[in-house]
Image: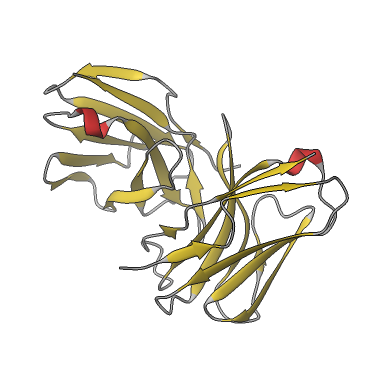
Amino acid sequence: DVKVTQSSRYLVKRTGEKVFLECVQDMDHENMFWYRQDPGLGLRLIYFSYDVKMKEKGDIPEGYSVSREKKERFSLILESASTNQTSMYLCASSFGAAGNEKLFFGSGTQLSVL
Amino acid sequence: QKEVEQNSGPLSVPEGAIASLNCTYSDRGSQSFFWYRQYSGKSPELIMFIYSNGDKEDGRFTAQLNKASQYVSLLIRDSQPSDSATYLCAVNGGTYKYIFGTGTRLKVLA
């Protein structure tokens, strides 16, 4: 079974802190994604990566950056956390580029910025 | 702005009934359509995908796609309390991009 592991289930940070969210997948998937999920807004794509060192902006990249130095690991960075970044963050991975790929999600990180 | 619309619910059905979940999308060029199930406090998991007009069946689940009407639905036959969850509709919005609806919460009453 594909496993997508997010480093923390719950995280509490202060405004202005730099925050790192880590995601690791064990199935050699090419594609990795970061979403945030908010009530009433659904899942929104922050960034994605289709290869090592490659990254593309999603729909809401402002205030975030990403790093993919190894195929299995995709990190989301909040350069200076703000209260409006309090959310559930979901990492996902997939294989291929045909447009019908199944997304495998990690268990999520509930981030609270105080 | 490409959009995927779902009724937030909750949709309540008695155990054993058919649950019908609906989704509309705005981009006529969309080719692939997905249904994810998300239990409370858990992450989404894919239960169905469809890319051709018509019906696709998998066990108790049937996905229906009508591209002319830009409409995709999920039918759950013989609904069980364990089917109680939020169901997310997702549409392929370009290479690597998937647009998600806000989800419909389903409650199956025992």
Q: Is residue A103 left or right of residue B93?
A: left
Q: Quadrant of residue A84?
A: top right
Q: Quadrant of residue B12?
A: top left
Residue placed most toward the observer, A47 or B95: A47
Q: Residue at x 46, y 39 (%)?
A: B41
Q: Is residue A3 left or right of residue B61?
A: right
Which residue in the rendered view is the most extreme toward the right?
Answer: A16
Rendering coords of residue B53 (x, y %): 23, 46
Q: Is residue B62 left or right of residue B72?
A: left
Q: Residue at position x 18%, y 18% from top?
A: B110
Labels in figure, total: 0
Q: Is residue B98 or residue A27 the one in the foreground? A: A27
| Residue A76 on image: x %, y % | 68, 62
Colour mode of the rendering: secondary structure
Is the residue A100 above or below the residue A49 in the image?
Answer: above
Could you tell me residue A89's position as x and y percent? 60, 50
**Residue in view at x 40 percent, y 72 percent:** A95
Q: Residue at x 40, y 20 (%)?
A: B9
Q: Nearer the viewer, residue A28 or A54?
A: A28
Q: Please say if B23 is above or below B13.
A: below
Q: Is residue A104 above or below residue B84?
A: below
Quadrant that contains the N terminus of chain B: top right
